[in-house]
Image: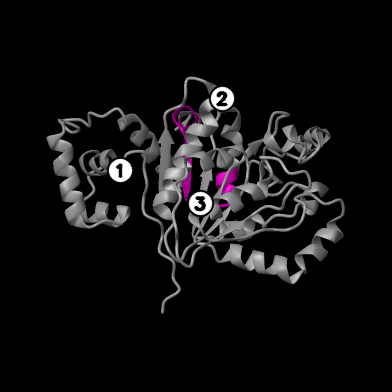
Amino acid sequence: MSTTKRRAAMVSSDLNVKTAWLYYVEGLTQEQIADRLDVSRVKVMRTLAACVAEGLVVTTINASTAGQVELERRLEERFGLHGAIVVPTPAEGEHLERAIGHAVALYLGEAMQDGMTLAIGGGATLHASLGFMKRRRLKKASVVGLVGGLPHSHWINPSIVAAKVAEMLEVDSYQITAPVMVHDPLLRSLLWEQPELMDVRRRAAAADIAVLTVGELTPNATIFRHKIAPASLLRPLKAKGAVANLLCYFVDSDGELVDHEVNSRVVAIDLETVAAIPNVVLAAGGREKVEAIRAALKAVRAGMLITDSETASRLLDGD
């Protein structure tokens, strides 16, 4: 049996409109579209016919989501992504995490199937997705947490997301049963030598999908606001060139770990292991995160981005 993992199908905020866009705007053949979307050519033909019948296509694509699909295609081209989902930016900023979280839940509802392993991080955006996930029962599937936990349990505890997603899918979950931050790099090395944590790392490396978010370097970032890392690190980290935190690791604008001792104390799956997972999904939005998102896309070589329209436009500034 072949162990080659197939690249994930192209996704969208509106697959019907994206089908029409690829055909009428970009000039792809029906066979090419079927291959990218992982559907039959008959499905593509029926979708195109329906788009015409419903008035989505006249001489231009006439749909409210056309602007989002255009942004998706530009993001895919600009950052070499195999897929992008762009949701409308909410009028109220405090609803942004829920809007992106909703898209994450819909994506996982389609992408996660029997026999698959999902590796997932933590953070406010991914926690928001929990409220929109539908309970399913998958067979021979599992969820692996990418980040250690917090001694003081709180909704922001990174391990909570993995456990609750596994509960919704009725599958086993595997956790890094150690604090996300330790005080001594030697202790971290010893922890990773434990057979149980070695098993979690192996399972993460063999995952089919990884979903994670990214934080910016501001006092309001989740990692500092909830004291996962002390705010006193902000200035020295910025002095080292840090622009983002990803799975609690701090990276520069090129997606490389900065030369700061805190990175040697993080108990999370390393970024190179995550980058090797076939389908890495980054879910993040907000004007303050634009630089961090650019860095994260490089750090884990993400193949898919879930974001909002305003953030997408800012990411594309200068194209």
* Measured Cα–Cα span from mark 1 to mark 2: 27 Å
Q: Is residue 114 visible?
A: yes
Q: Is residue 206 above or below residue 125?
A: below
The three-letter code of the residue at mark 1 reads Leu
Q: Residues within 10 Å of mark 2 (few under 14, many from 20)?
A: few
The residue that disc 1 covers is 15
How packed is label 1: few (under 14 Cα within 10 Å), some, or many (20 or more)?
some
Q: Which residue is rendered at x = 60% and y = 53% of the image?
A: 163
Range of magenta residues: 296-312
In the image shown, does 75 or 111 lie closer to the viewer?
A: 111
Q: Position of residue 117 (x, y in %)?
A: 51, 62
- The C terminus - image quarter: top left
Residue lying furthest bottom in this view?
1
Residue 28's x, y, as percent? Answer: 24, 48
Residue 81: tell me if it is visible. Answer: no
Q: Residues within 10 Å of mark 3 (few under 14, many from 20)?
A: some
Identify the image quadrant of residue 193. Answer: bottom right
Q: Amino acid at mark 3?
A: Met
Residue placed under numbered mark 2 in the picture: 94
Image height of 254 relative to 174, above or below = above
Please state which of the two labelled residues, at mark 1 or mark 2, is closer to the viewer: 2
x 67%, y 37%: residue: 243
Comparing marks 3 and 2, which lies closer to the viewer?
A: 3
State the mark number for residue 168. 3
Q: CA distance from mark 3 to mark 2?
A: 25 Å
Of helix, strand and loop, which one carries label 2? helix
Ranked by sequence position, the earlier of labels 1 and 2 is 1
